[in-house]
Amino acid sequence: MICPRCEQDDVIKAMIKANKSIIFICPECEATWFSIDEIKFPGFVDYMTYMKSIGLSHLWDELEIISEKI
Ligand SMILES: [Zn+2]
């Protein structure tokens, strides 16, 4: 699925290793969603902002990629 925010890359499915939660994130602009049904624009959160809010770093090392295509 093409990112509805930047339309530059495919949204991927990933797991935040620290809390095992699943997110959907655009590798290009780092727009983040929590449900595949909610992937639209507007309606995203910023990955860095979200990770800071839960006390994690915003490095991609925090993520385990589950699927490159959704
Ligand atoms: Zn994007």
Image: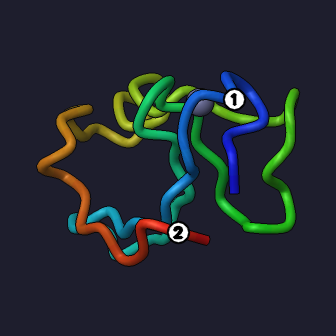
Measured Cα–Cα span from mark 2 to mark 1: 14 Å
Vertical placement of residue 11 versus 46, above or below: below
Figure check: 1 above or below 35: above
Residue 16, image x and y in percent?
A: 32, 62
Write the residue at 39% across / 42% down: 54
Please tell me in which quadrant of the rendered image residue 9 appears.
top right
Residue 64: where, in percent of width, then height? 24, 68
Q: 44 or 1: nearer the eye?
A: 1
Work out which residue is located at the far left of the displayed protein and give it: 61
> Mark 2 or mark 1: which comes first in sequence?
1
In the rendered structure, find residue 61 and report the number of the disc placed on it.
Answer: none
Q: Secondary structure at mark 2?
A: loop
The residue under label 2 is 69
Ligand 1 location (quadrant)? top right
Where disc 1 sits, the SS reads loop
Q: Residues within 10 Å of mark 2 (few under 14, many from 20)?
A: few
Is disc 1 surrounded by few (<14), some (14 to 19) or many (20+) residues within 10 Å? Answer: few
Give the residue type that dot 2 points to.
Lys
Give the residue displayed 61% in from the left and 71% down from the top: 70
Quadrant position of residue 43: top right
Residue tagged 1: 7
In what quadrant of the picture does the N terminus appear?
bottom right
Residue under the point 49% across and 70% down: 22
- Left or right: 44 in relation to 70: right
Mark 1 and ligand 1: say if the CB distance to the nearest ligand atom is below 8 Å. Answer: yes
Residue 9, placed above or below residue 2 = above
Instruction: State which quadrant residue 28 falls in.
Output: top left
Query: Is ligand 1 less than 8 Å from the beta carbon at label 2?
Result: no
